[in-house]
Amino acid sequence: MIISESTLKKAIDYKAYRETIDTLFKEGKVTGPEQNQDLLDYTKLNISRMNRVDKTSLISDDMRETLSKIKSPLIWLVLAEGWCGDAAQIVPYFNTIASSSNNKIDLKFLFRDENLDLMDQFLTNGARSIPKLIIVDAASKQVIGQWGPRPFEAQDLINKLKEQGIEMDNIKEKLHRWYADNKSAALDKELTDVLKEAISEIIKA
């Protein structure tokens, strides 16, 4: 699949993504068409979560070594929304990786609900789950990898809690406690593997 130039031109960098969320929040608004108090409360929490991950995240030695092997520049195109709890825990780490890539990864963001045509090409079990990372070869604009919406370990936790009949509010609380305790270790490992595969796809081409 090829990502069009018009789509990429709409995408914004991490700084603009954060500023958009912050500016809307100060106006009592959230990203996306739906506006309500719950989404505003989630966004407030997520701003704090993103600030924490920004300050504390570190990449692994394996990720650093994998980044050093990138020969052809990549675009990491991310579909997300400011009210999404998983996105808040994850997208700052995307930025940590991109910032450590010696300009080999160009990190870009699109808000999901403004780009449903693209989102619907990257569904997870039929759902518009976010964040969704789309890895693109910068030269050819070919999609060479994808990841999301959350680490497998986190998804397993959610599945087990649902099987136990735990209420969704409690599931969310336990999920975010998992994110805090895990400190992006599972995320780092999965993204390292995805990046290795993406690099090999470029070599094959």
Image (spheres, rainbow, N blue to C red):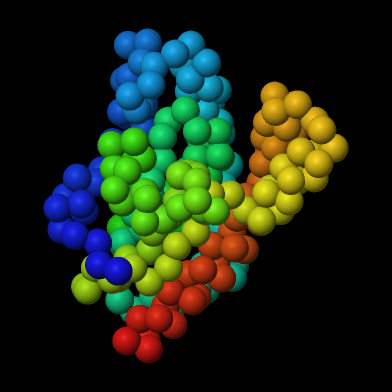
| Towards the viewer: 165 or 157 | 165
Q: Residue furthest bottom?
A: 204
- Image quarter for residue 190? bottom right
- Image quarter for residue 100? bottom left
Instruction: Name which residue lies at 41% across and 41% down.
Output: 80
Q: Position of residue 200 (x, y in %)?
A: 44, 82
Instruction: Name which residue lies at 38% across and 21% down.
Output: 34
Q: Is residue 133 above or below residue 137?
A: above
Q: Is residue 66 above or below residue 152?
A: below
Instruction: Name which residue lies at 69% across and 48% down.
Output: 154
Q: Position of residue 118 (x, y in %)?
A: 31, 51
Q: Is residue 5 left or right of residue 161?
A: left
Q: Position of residue 143 (x, y in %)?
A: 33, 68
Whether residue 125 is visible: yes
Q: Is residue 152 above or below residue 88?
A: below
Q: Position of residue 69 (x, y in %)?
A: 43, 78
